[in-house]
Image (cartoon, rainbow, N blue to C red):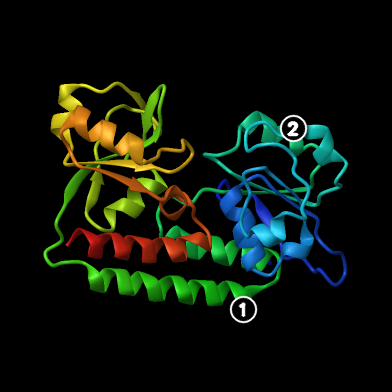
Amino acid sequence: MFLTDAVGNQHQIVNASASAPRIVSLVPSITELICDLGLAPYLVGRTGFCIHPSEVVQHIPKIGGTKDVNIEKIRRLNATHLLVNIDENEKPCVEQLAEFIPHVIVTHPQTPQDNLDLFSLLGNIFNVPERAKQLSEQFLSVQDALQCSLPQPLIRQRVLYCIWKDPWMTVSKQTYIAAMLAQIGWDTVEVGTKRYPVFEWSQAIVDAVDLVLLSSEPYRFTEQYVDALEQQTGKPVLLLDGEMISWYGSRSIAGLTYLRELVQAQR
C-alpha cells in the first residue's frame, strides 16, 4: 500500500517493529502533530521554531530554522524521513536534503478541512491509524461546535491579517490562514498578487477593510501596536494568537475552539 503526499510522492507504511524510523521535521506544526500521534520517540531533529509540546521537544536536537537548516548536522542524524511544507521550507534546501534522506514527505494544507487528510497521511505512513482517527474525530467535533456558535445569517467582515512589519506583510485568500478566518465570516482583502504580499498603508487599503488583525507570529505584534494602528487607521484592531490561526495539524483542533471564542467575544 502506498500513500501520496502533497506533491505526489508515494510512501510506504513504516513497520517500526522491523526498522524504527528516524524523523526530522522542518515544520513546527507538523512536529507537534507527530508528537500528538505518539511518534515523538522517532523524532531525531527539529527546527528552533518547533516549540510544542515543550516538555517533549526540548530533548530533540535543533537543526536550524525552517529556511536556514544546518545540512551537515542533519546528515549526521541518519534520518529516514524528512517532513516539510511547501510554504515554510525552501525547495532548493529540501532537494539537497533529499539527496541523503530516503523519504521526503511534503505537506501543504490549504484549508482547515485539509487537516483530516494530513492526520490520515501521517497516521497511516507511520502506522498509527487509530490515533489519527481520534484526532480526526476531535477535529470534526470542535468544527461542529464552531458552526453551531455562528450567528445566522453569518455577519461578514473584511479583514487585513498582518504577519510582518518593516515591511508590512499580509496573507492572500489562497492561504490556510485566510481559510481559517473565513469560517467565522472574516474575509481577507487582497492587496497584491502573491500568497504573502508586501503592502504599504494607504487610504485605499484603510477604506477596504472593516477590521485589522495583528498576528502574534511570525512578527511578535503586541498591544502597543494595536493602539498605534487604531489611531493611524481609525479602524478597530485585534491582536490574535498566530499559532491558533496559522498552525495546521493537531493545533487546528484548539484553533477552531479559539475561533469560536472570538465569535462569542465579538457579540
Of the numbered discs 1 and 2, the one sitting upstream in the chain is 2
Tag on residue 96? 2
Amino acid marked by disc 2: Gln
Residue 174 appears anywhere in the view? no
Please tell me which residue lies in front, 249 or 229.
229
Q: Left of 21 or right of it: where is 251?
A: left
State the residue position of label 1.
130
Q: Who's the residue at 64% across and 55% down the image?
A: 31
- For label 1, count other residues whose C-alpha is less than 10 Å away and answer few (under 14), some (14-19) or many (20+): few
Q: Secondary structure at mark 1?
A: helix
Contact, mark 1 vs mark 2 (Cβ under 8 Å): no
Locate the N terminus by quadrant: bottom right
Q: Quadrant of residue 38?
A: bottom right
Amino acid marked by disc 1: Glu
Q: Who's the residue at 39% across and 40% down the image?
A: 222
Q: Quadrant of residue 84?
A: top right
Q: CA distance from mark 1 to mark 2?
A: 34 Å
Q: Who's the residue at 80% across and 69% down the image?
A: 15
Where in the figure is residue 173, as x and y percent of width and height?
A: 31, 41
Q: Left of 51 or right of it: where is 98?
A: right
Where in the figure is residue 135, as x and y percent of width and height?
A: 53, 72
Placement of 142 over or under 26, stated as above or below: below
Q: How many marks?
A: 2
